[in-house]
Structure formats: structure tokens, C-alpha cells
């Protein structure tokens, strides 16, 4: 009997898996923008501290211990205590939570407002664009802190009011950046092709323009978080922010901290350093994102 031979099966070479886009971007961030990477690490630390403040804080943010009034930093009280004996480290952690909530919420809502105004105004153009931009010019002509103080004085202090006011202010100001990006994308050939086959304006804006302006949107959001935290701290410092006893970094810098600054400098030093560090880190991370996501900056 003749032996039956089977054809040798050819084994296809294993397909090399493309590296994850997020992992590759993280490697580029640490390799090309180390300062931005350090800023991103600090941002994650503050975000983690704010989310898990209940677990990390050794004391309550309003827990009064009269026997420990104005204690300097030690192993028991890492950042010292204030004039009422409250642990400053715990208050800073809870203040980070409020800063994270206000910063992310106001920056996210403001980015949506910027996208809506910038994309619609830049895509439609003509007299509508001119009218919208004159409104934006008029809005930007007013000092930002004065507008915030007046509006808060009218509607009253509180976290929802602060988030809404800061979102509207940042959203209208940021629409200029989105509009400039839309004006360049609007003239691309794929946008004209979509219009020629009968694409509706809403479909063209959502499917073709929005994905191509996401790089400045991401940068606008990251920078907006730092600006919102700084603006909220300024309002709290002036007494128009989140009302006590909720601890905010700006609120911790005013009142008792100013009165006892020479006797207990750590009362103002701890929240001031945290505020400076988180805003600086967010700005450095935003600048790194801009350089990595913008093809022109990347080639340069």
C-alpha cells in the first residue's frame, strides 16, 4: 500500500502586536518632555490625594484640638496645626478634593462651551461669526476677577455657583482657540468632500471637524484645570468662594493664616506651596501635551 503523505502545513509568522498607543505616548512624554512628565506625576498624586482624602487624612478637616493649638510640623502633625488646633495636613487633603472637583468640573464644562461656540462660529462664518466674536471681545474686555466677584455677590457663594461661573468665563475665553483651529480644518479637502456629497452641517462638524481639533481641546482642558483652581483660590481668599467650614486652599490662606502668619508661618506655607505646585504641574503637563500633539511643534 502506498504511503499517504500529507502536505506540510505552513505556519504563518506570528504577527507582531503594535504597541499600545497610550504606552507609546507615555514613553514619548517621559523621553522628550521630562518636565511635563514630572508635572503629570504630581497631578496624579494630587488627584489621588483628593479622591482618597477620607482614608489618607489622619484627622477630620474640622476636628478641633485646643491642646494642640499652633503646633509646628512634627511626626504627629506633618504640616502643623492652626490656631484652633486643626491638623493642616488633613485640611490640605480635603482642600485638594474640593480643588479636584471644582477644577475638573468647571474645566470640563468650560471645554464643552468652548467647543460649542468655537466649532459653530468657525464653521458657519460670515456675519454670524462676526457677531459671536464681537460678543467674545466684549466679554474679554472686562477684568475676569471683577466679573467673578460681581456674579458671586449676586448669586451667592457655593460650589455649584463657583463651578458654573468659572465654566462660563473659561468657556467663552477658550472659544477663540477652538475657532482658530476650526478655520484651518474647515478648508481641508475632506471637509469639502463631505459637503459635496450632501453631508449636513451637524454631521460635518461632529464627524469631520471635531475629531481633528481634539489636540487643542485636550490642551485647553488641562490648562483650564489649573486656571480654575487658581481662580477659585483667589475667590476663596477674598471671601467669595466655597463657604466655611469646607477647607479650600484659598480660604486657608486668608483669615487666621494672615493673622498668625508670623507666629505660625506653616499655616499659610502649606496650602500656598500645594497651590503653587499643583498649578505649576498642570501647566507643565499642558505645555508638554501641546508640544506632543501638535505636528508642527513635534517636527520642530
Image (cartoon, rainbow, N blue to C red):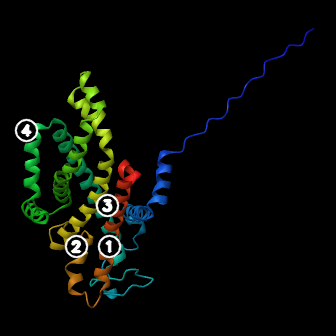
The residue at which mark 3 appears reads as: 100
Closest to the camera, between mark 1 and mark 4, is 4
The quarter of the displayed image where residue 200 is located: top left
Identify the mark nearer the N-term, 1 or 4.
Answer: 1
Residue 240 in picture, x, y percent from top left:
14, 68
The answer for how far apart the CA atoms under marks 3 and 2 are is: 15 Å
The quarter of the displayed image where residue 68 is located: bottom left
Residue 60 appearing in the image: no
Mark 3 vs 1: CB contact within 8 A: no
The residue at which mark 4 appears reads as: 127
The residue at which mark 2 appears reads as: 251
The residue at which mark 1 appears reads as: 91
Pick the quarter of the image with the N terminus.
top right
Q: Residue furthest right?
A: 1
Residue located 51% across and 45% down the image: 20
The answer for how far apart the CA atoms under marks 1 and 2 are is: 11 Å
The answer for how far apart the CA atoms under marks 3 and 4 are is: 39 Å
Identify the mark nearer the N-term, 1 or 2.
Answer: 1
Amino acid at each position: 500500500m502506498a504511503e499517504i503523505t500529507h502536505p506540510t502545513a505552513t505556519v504563518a509568522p506570528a504577527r507582531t502586536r503594535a504597541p499600545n498607543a497610550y504606552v507609546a505616548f507615555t514613553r514619548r512624554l517621559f523621553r522628550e518632555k521630562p518636565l511635563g512628565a514630572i508635572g503629570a506625576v504630581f497631578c496624579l498624586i494630587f488627584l489621588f490625594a483628593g479622591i482618597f482624602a477620607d482614608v489618607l487624612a489622619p484627622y477630620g478637616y474640622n476636628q478641633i484640638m485646643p491642646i494642640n493649638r499652633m503646633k509646628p510640623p512634627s511626626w504627629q502633625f506633618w504640616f502643623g496645626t492652626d490656631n484652633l488646633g486643626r491638623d493642616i495636613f488633613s485640611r490640605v487633603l480635603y482642600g485638594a478634593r474640593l480643588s479636584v472637583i471644582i477644577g475638573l468640573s468647571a474645566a470640563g464644562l468650560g471645554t464643552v462651551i468652548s467647543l460649542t461656540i468655537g466649532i459653530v462660529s468657525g464653521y458657519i462664518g460670515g456675519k454670524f461669526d462676526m457677531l459671536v466674536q464681537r460678543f467674545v471681545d466684549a466679554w474679554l474686555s472686562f477684568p475676569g476677577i471683577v466679573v467673578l466677584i460681581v456674579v458671586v455677590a449676586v448669586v451667592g457663594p457655593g460650589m455649584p455657583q463657583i463651578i458654573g461661573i468659572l465654566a462660563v468665563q473659561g468657556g467663552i475665553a477658550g472659544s477663540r482657540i477652538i475657532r482658530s483651529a476650526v478655520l484651518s480644518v474647515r478648508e481641508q479637502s475632506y471637509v469639502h468632500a463631505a459637503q459635496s456629497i450632501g453631508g449636513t452641517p451637524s454631521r460635518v462638524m461632529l464627524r469631520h471637524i471635531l475629531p481633528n481639533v481634539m489636540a487643542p481641546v485636550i490642551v485647553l482642558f488641562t490648562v483650564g484645570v489649573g486656571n480654575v483652581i487658581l481662580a477659585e483660590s483667589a475667590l476663596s481668599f477674598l471671601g467669595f468662594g466655597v463657604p466655611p467650614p469646607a477647607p479650600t486652599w484659598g480660604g486657608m490662606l486668608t483669615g487666621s493664616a494672615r493673622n498668625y502668619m508670623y507666629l505660625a508661618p506653616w499655616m499659610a506655607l502649606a496650602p500656598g506651596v500645594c497651590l503653587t505646585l499643583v498649578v505649576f504641574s498642570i501647566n507643565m503637563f499642558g505645555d508638554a501635551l501641546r508640544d506632543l500633539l501638535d505636528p508642527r511643534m513635534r517636527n520642530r
